[in-house]
Amino acid sequence: MAALQLDKIDLTILRLMQSHGKLSNQELAEKVGLSPSPCSRRVKTLEESGYISGYATLLSAEHFHLSLTAYVQVRLEKHTTEILESFESKVSSYDEVQECCLLTGSDADYQLKVLVADMNQFKLFLLDKLTTHPHIAGVHSSFVLKQVKNQTSIPLPS
């Protein structure tokens, strides 16, 4: 499929949808200066071309008493495809893990963002889940004291 050339209206639609996900098509069309049908067609084209990868409702961790965020760096003993895939599969099954990234330029192989209620839950996650993987050589955890910025939107061209 050929790459879609985004114009100013497309970019405005994407910006508005990132920041105000509950806008109706009617409201979105008014804000970008289109009638509802062409606006809906543009959104559908943006979805089909992969610029919009999905929709989600962001929940408040506070309301679920999830107040401890940890960044956990994991070092594996070996780097075979089988071991990496096994680790990634296991970590992907844990609801506490919000993000998992394979790293370069660090002593760690992976960095996990973990969200739990408290230190006791973190201890249970660490001991009963994460470190049960047979190929972990080391784990280092850092805890968030204050979240300065948290955004789900990506930077778009001007």
Image: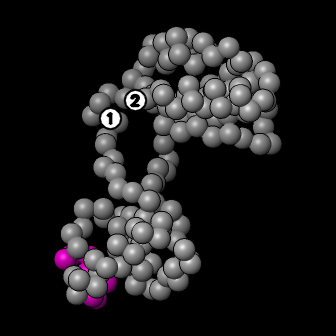
- Which quadrant of the figure has residue 137? top right
Q: Is residue 77 magenta?
A: no
Is 68 placed above or below 57 here? above
Q: Is residue 139 left or right of residue 114?
A: right
Q: Which residue is mark 1?
A: 62
Q: Position of residue 67 (x, y in %)?
A: 40, 29
* Residue drawn 25% across the image and 62% down it: 22
Q: Earlier in the sequence, mark 1 or mark 2?
A: 1
Query: How many angstroms separate mark 1 from mark 2 (CA)?
Result: 6 Å
Check if mark 1's residue and mark 2's residue have beta carbons within 8 Å: yes
* Residue drawn 60% across the image and 12% down it: 132
Is 91 placed above or below 38 here? above
Q: Position of residue 83 (x, y in %)?
A: 71, 26
Q: Which residue is mark 2?
A: 67
Q: Is residue 88 left or right of residue 11?
A: right
* Residue drawn 57% across the image and 30% down it: 89
Q: Which residues are magenta?
A: 26-34
Mark 2, secondary structure of its residue: loop
Give whichever of 73, 82 is nearer the camera: 82
Q: Is residue 28 magenta?
A: yes
- Asked if residue 80 can be seen in this view, the reply is yes
Q: Amino acid at mark 1?
A: Glu
Pointer 1 local density, CA inside 10 Å: few below 14, some 14–19, many at least 20: few
Is 14 placed above or below 74 here? below
Q: What quarter of the picture does the N terminus occupy? A: bottom right
Give whichever of 39, 9 is nearer the camera: 39
Q: Position of residue 11 (x, y in %)?
A: 45, 78
